[in-house]
């Protein structure tokens, strides 16, 4: 066991130890982990649910191709299927193998909106508004041009007079007439909606002679569609200029107009400079919806007929009424069916999935901050864990967790059929997610340095999760969809990792959505070249950020956590600088010489011993402190603080050195220097011959620390702690098991299953004992214990003392304590440490002899006999001093060389015969008296100087 621990543990041993610890830690956190994994599953299921609702709505019979709802009369409807065309809504996705032909139509204003005379229009040729009551308002067309005769002649040819329809050739014979409808058109349809609407088709004639209607039949597959046709008067009015027309049309708009002012017209023709030789016409049409996509009305389909009307009329003007240029029918192109699936999950994906992925950030962050908050990182370091293994294992560990998480997420998403995952190339997804989780881990490492508590890290982390998702979904996406937003701006925003993630997911969702809708696949590698595809930029940004953040995080970690100089990579240069700075405080040296003169011979001797040892460069001593000094620089106007002044101390192997001292004397500063938490301002110490300024990393491998506050993982058991630290100390296999068992037994944590309880559930005393056990595991050569027995009950304390006593056989122990009893019990030598320097060094007996050369004599009588007691003491010892006197109780110090104990007893017996002695006592000086004396003396001197 001793052999193996001498060799410092290798990189892989440390990595192995850390990995095993992390795995156990993870196992303990199983509930949190399950919750973590369930979150994306929950979101995926939610998406699937929404998708199913949408699908079931789309799958309703009323939306299925070839089905229609037939009204059965009593308000209910019966679904009939198996017909070729059913409703216009279905035309969007249903196949149209044999599109029907239908006569071209004009867009006719609805009855109530047709132009009439009103107080806003100055034209008297418009009809009065009484026609609105009878529903017989004419449909107005406005004409203008350079030559009124010409214009009106041509316009007159537009509307045929005699009604002569051959029903067996309906399309051909209807082509002579101007037909129109007030129904709204559709973007996707297989027939003009006019033939399926409740409004009859209007047949425009100069005069409606009969109000009778007839119906036209249009063949729709195997069925026939009947639609009523009724006559509507077409009114053609001459205007003198296009400006007038413009003005009149402007007043016609429905929107924003009180109803009475609406004045819609069919169309307006400006023949401009047309004549027999030139046909130059401008047609006005209502283009309100001319370029809307989606399912809003689109009137463009009803524009061609209005042009044909003018062309045909002009042709007839030139060549006579028998010449015709017929516009017989309109027909859709045949098309195949498309699947009617609104891929909702793809549309909502970016927001949900941003949450899912960024959720890992607080997880990694809190885990890092936890180790920082509880100072576990430094604790591990002090027990020999190097930065290399720490980084490698932590990084690999978080990467593994993130990868598993993402893998579950993608597999689950694919399994439940989300197109977002299934359509896009998995290799692109892999690269994208992999790069991003790496970036995220590095960011967490970087940001972890800013947080000191898990609570704030958690709060900030989750705020970032939701903030990123929402900002991405409701702000960033807005910029993405705004094609006028400069690309550079988007790229700048993508520098924020959350947005680059959002962008990537957004691209996936767009490709998945379009791929699903169009029947093409999702994103493929070749699609990265698309100009609209931001994925390539995003991948580059993330990859570059990953590297930059990784380096920055490592650098920051070295500076912040490992306490290295910000310029540590220029190490050589730095060394010269610092060695010169050691000589700076020469003034202080003289100041402390004064102290040395104050009869601190023992301290002086120790200093000489150290100097001697340094010359000999002998290795018989485990710890040699040479003029160790720590000055805290002045801050906020406070003067510099000397925490440790020129401390020289040599500790042999097998020695336990106790450090006593009042609070704030600098004991903890001293320990912190020795364990590498802070750097000495000057001087140095050698541990096993290694310099604490330069070789701390090697010192750590043979060092044990029991810090003042227990640094433990709450979810790991005592046994697991010991296994972890034992492995760090290069213990393996049976030796490790044995060491852990022994260690647990020695601190009384073995029985009753205590060893397998989580450390978070331990009482203060148990934690303390575990800390001591940790500091001793792996047979370290040097152990520092900062107040190891604070808060222990007497029984545990005794047990702990036995452990320490046994442990000190072959190692050096430095122990700070407030308990004199403990110091006396454990330590071979003691140093009383006041105001940053040692006041005395020696073994307890020596110290007591030197500082406590007196007995303490106490006697209690009635107050009337006080003088007699004083006299008695005077007789015993003329140099006695009274320490205190309170209502009959007096305490004296009697120099040891002046009295014999037997005399004291005799004198007391005599006194008892003369007056009543209620109580009396004689005591040797305790270490406590020594301590108080030394501490008080030193403080008096320091206030004097
Ligand atoms: C106007 O048009 C008519 C009919 O085409 C034509 O006879 C007449 O000469 C034209 N007038 C002018 C001024 O061009
Ligand atoms: C009606 O159209 C059919 C088919 O083109 C034709 O055979 C028939 O002669 C026409 N009838 C009249 C009265 O023009
Ligand atoms: C054009 O059509 C729209 C929509 O049908 C209507 O609101 C508007 O009033 C029309 N304008 C004119 C001048 O007919
Ligand atoms: C047709 O009329 C427009 C005026 O609206 C004019 O600019 C254009 O030159 C004319 N075309 C011809 C061939 O005269
Ligand atoms: C209609 O919209 C498309 C796409 O938004 C555009 O490319 C096209 O130029 C528009 N057409 C007109 C006439 O404005």
Image: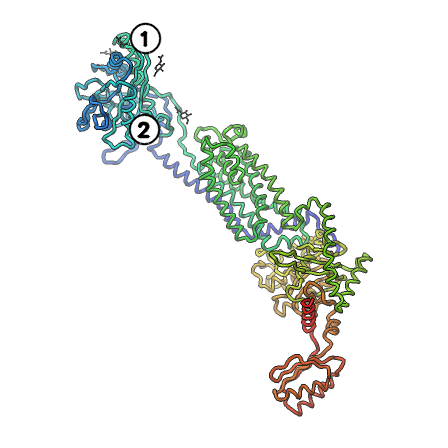
Tell me if label 2 and label 1 are in contact, CB under 8 Å. Answer: no
Whether residue 828 appears in this view of the structure is no
**Neighbourhood count class around disc 1 (C-alpha, 10 Å): few under 14, some 14–19, many 20 upward:** few
Q: Quadrant of the C terminus?
A: bottom right
Question: To which residue does mark 1 refer?
Answer: 277
Residue 153 falls left or right of residue 330: left
Q: Quadrant of the N terminus?
A: bottom right
Where residue 561 appears, x then y in whole percent? 63, 50
Where residue 894 appears, x then y in whole percent? 71, 81
Residue 479, above or below 814: above
Give the farthest residue toward the right.
616
Residue 468 falls left or right of residue 171: right
Which callout, 2 or 1, points at the residue further toward the start of the chain? Answer: 2
> Mark 2 against mark 1, which lies toward the viewer?
1
**Neighbourhood count class around disc 2 (C-alpha, 10 Å): few under 14, some 14–19, many 20 upward:** many
Residue 685, above or below 873: above
Locate residue 573: give its quadrant: top right
Question: To which residue does mark 2 refer?
Answer: 87
């Amino acid at each position: 066991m001793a052999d193996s621990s001498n060799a410092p543990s290798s990189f892989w041993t440390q990595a192995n130890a850390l990995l095993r610890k992390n795995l156990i830690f993870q196992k303990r956190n199983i509930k949190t982990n399950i919750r973590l994994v369930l979150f994306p599953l929950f979101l995926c299921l939610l998406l699937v649910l929404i998708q199913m609702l949408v699908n079931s709505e789309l799958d309703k019979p009323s939306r299925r191709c070839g089905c229609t709802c037939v009204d059965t009369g009593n308000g209910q409807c019966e679904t009939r299927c198996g017909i070729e065309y059913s409703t216009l809504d279905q035309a969007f996705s249903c196949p149209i193998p044999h599109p029907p032909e239908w006569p071209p139509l004009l867009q006719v204003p609805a009855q109530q909106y047709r132009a009439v005379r009103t107080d806003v229009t100055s034209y008297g040729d418009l009809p009065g508004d009484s026609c609105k009551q009878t529903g017989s308002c004419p449909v107005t067309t406005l004409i203008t041009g350079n030559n009124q005769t010409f214009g009106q002649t041509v316009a007159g040819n537009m509307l045929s007079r005699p009604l002569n329809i051959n029903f067996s050739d309906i399309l051909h014979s209807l082509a002579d007439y101007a037909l129109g409808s007030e129904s709204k058109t559709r973007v996707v349809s297989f027939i003009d909606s006019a033939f399926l609407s409740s409004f009859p088709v209007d047949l425009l004639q100069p005069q409606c002679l009969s109000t009778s209607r007839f119906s036209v039949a249009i063949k729709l597959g195997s069925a026939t569609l009947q639609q009523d046709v009724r006559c509507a008067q077409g009114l053609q009015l001459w205007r003198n200029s296009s400006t007038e027309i413009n003005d009149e049309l402007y007043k016609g708009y429905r929107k924003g107009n009180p109803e009475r002012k609406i004045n819609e017209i069919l169309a307006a023709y400006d023949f401009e400079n047309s004549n027999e030789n030139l046909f130059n016409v401008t047609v006005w049409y209502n283009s309100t919806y001319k370029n809307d996509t989606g399912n809003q009305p689109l009137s463009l389909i009803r524009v061609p007929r209005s042009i044909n009307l003018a062309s045909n009329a002009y042709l007839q003007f030139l060549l006579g009424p028998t010449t015709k240029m017929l516009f017989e029918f309109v027909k859709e192109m045949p098309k195949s069916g498309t699947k009617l699936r609104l891929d909702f999950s793809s549309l909502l994906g970016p927001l949900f999935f941003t949450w899912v992925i960024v959720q890992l950030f607080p997880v990694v962050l809190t885990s890092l901050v936890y180790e920082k908050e509880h100072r576990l990182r430094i604790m591990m370091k002090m027990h020999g864990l190097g930065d290399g293994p720490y980084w490698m294992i932590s990084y690999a560990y978080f990467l593994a967790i993130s990868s598993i998480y993402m893998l579950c997420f993608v597999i689950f998403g694919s399994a439940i059929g989300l197109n977002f995952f299934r359509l896009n190339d998995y290799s692109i997804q892999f690269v994208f997610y992999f790069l991003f989780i790496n970036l995220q881990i590095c960011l967490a490492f970087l940001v972890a340095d800013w947080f000191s508590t898990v609570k704030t890290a958690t709060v900030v982390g989750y705020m970032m999760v939701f903030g990123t998702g929402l900002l991405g979904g409701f702000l960033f996406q807005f910029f993405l969809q705004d094609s006028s937003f400069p690309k550079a701006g988007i790229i700048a925003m993508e520098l924020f990792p959350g947005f680059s993630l959002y962008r990537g997911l957004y691209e996936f969702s767009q490709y998945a959505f379009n791929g699903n809708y169009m029947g093409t696949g999702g994103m493929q590698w070749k699609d990265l070249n698309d100009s609209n595809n931001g994925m390539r930029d995003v991948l580059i940004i993330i990859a570059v950020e990953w590297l930059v953040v990784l380096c920055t995080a490592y650098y920051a970690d070295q500076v912040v956590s490992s306490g290295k100089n910000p310029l540590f990579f220029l190490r050589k240069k730095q060394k010269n600088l610092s060695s010169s700075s050691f000589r700076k405080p020469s003034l202080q040296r003289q100041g402390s010489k004064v102290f040395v003169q104050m009869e601190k011979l023992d301290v002086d001797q120790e200093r000489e011993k150290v100097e001697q040892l340094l010359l000999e460069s002998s290795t018989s001593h485990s710890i040699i402190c040479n003029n160790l000094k720590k000055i805290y620089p002045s801050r906020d106007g406070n003067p510099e603080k000397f925490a440790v002044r020129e401390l020289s101390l040599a500790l042999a192997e097998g020695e336990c050195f106790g450090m006593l001292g009042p609070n704030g004397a600098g004991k903890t500063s001293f320990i912190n220097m020795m364990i590498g938490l802070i750097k000495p301002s000057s001087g140095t110490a050698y541990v096993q011959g290694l310099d604490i300024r330069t070789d701390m990393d090697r010192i750590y491998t043979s060092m044990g620390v029991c810090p003042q506050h227990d640094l433990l993982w709450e979810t790991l058991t005592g046994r697991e702690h010991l296994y972890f630290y034992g492995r760090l100390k290069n213990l393996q296999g049976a030796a490790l098991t044995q060491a852990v068992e022994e260690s647990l037994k020695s601190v009384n944590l073995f029985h009753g299953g205590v060893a397998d309880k989580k450390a978070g559930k331990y009482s203060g005393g148990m934690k303390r004992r575990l800390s001591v056990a940790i500091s001793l595991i792996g047979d370290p050569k040097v152990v520092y214990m900062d107040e190891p027995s604070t808060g222990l009950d007497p029984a545990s304390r005794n047990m702990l003392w036995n452990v320490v006593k046994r442990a000190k056989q072959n190692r050096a122990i430095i122990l700070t304590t407030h308990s004199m009893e403990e110091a006396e019990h454990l330590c071979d030598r003691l140093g009383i440490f006041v105001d940053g320097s040692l006041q005395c060094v020696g073994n307890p007996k020596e110290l007591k002899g030197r500082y406590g050369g007196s007995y303490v004599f106490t006697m209690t009588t009635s107050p009337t006999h006080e003088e007699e007691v004083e006299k008695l003491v005077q007789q015993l010892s003329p140099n006695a001093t009274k320490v205190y006197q309170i209502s009959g109780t007096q305490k004296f110090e009697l120099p040891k060389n002046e009295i014999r104990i037997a005399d004291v007893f005799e004198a007391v017996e005599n006194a008892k015969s003369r007056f009543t002695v209620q109580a009396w006592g004689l005591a040797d000086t305790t270490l406590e008296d020594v301590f108080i004396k030394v501490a008080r003396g030193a403080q008096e001197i320091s206030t004097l100087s």
